[in-house]
Amino acid sequence: MTKTKKISYWASTIFLSFGMLAGGIQQMLQIGGYNEIISQLGFPLYLLSILGTWKILGVIAILIPKRPLLKEWAYAGFFFVMSGATISHIAVGQPITEAMPSIILLLVTVMSWYYRPNDRKINELQKQN
């Protein structure tokens, strides 16, 4: 792994982890304006607790060593929740600026996944067996 790729991976992964952890805690506790956002999108408030809990668990999965299959699931979950958030903002007619946090986290999710080291990929695990 090149130095540039390693820096890209850790920079995007740290940003992603911080964003998901901060958002996950706020959503789980239903603070920080998330109640208003989720209500404007037409979703029930209990969804915040579910999303927040899964985001926190996803951050743990991405940061712990090994467990490449678990990491793939976490990245997939982050991709689905951020793309869903982006689409939800657009679907209710909000300006694109309202969707920017979810768009940024979606792009950072893809970056972190793309630049992850070989030992964090499923195909490397399959080659070892």
Image: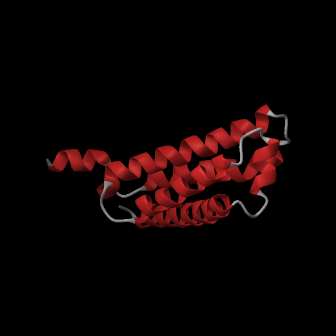
Residue sticking out furthest to the top: 91
Q: Is residue 94 left or right of residue 52?
A: right
The image shows residue 74, relative to residue 95, as above or below, that is below
The image shows residue 102, relative to residue 64, as above or below, that is above
Q: Residue at x 63, y 66 (%)?
A: 22
The image shows residue 99, relative to residue 67, as above or below, that is above
From the image, which quarter does the N terminus lie in? bottom left
Residue 125 screen position, x and y as percent: 23, 50
Q: Residue at x 58, y 54 (%)?
A: 108
Q: Toward the viewer: 62 or 116?
A: 62
Q: Toward the viewer: 46 or 84?
A: 46
Q: Quadrant of residue 49?
A: bottom right
Residue 68 screen position, x and y as percent: 32, 52
- Colour basis: secondary structure
Q: Residue at x 75, y 55 (%)?
A: 34
Residue 50 screen position, x and y as percent: 58, 50
The image shows residue 8, relative to residue 43, as above or below, that is below
Residue 46 screen position, x and y as percent: 66, 48
Q: Quadrant of residue 19?
A: bottom right
Q: Is residue 48 left or right of residue 59?
A: right
Q: Residue at x 64, y 39 (%)?
A: 84
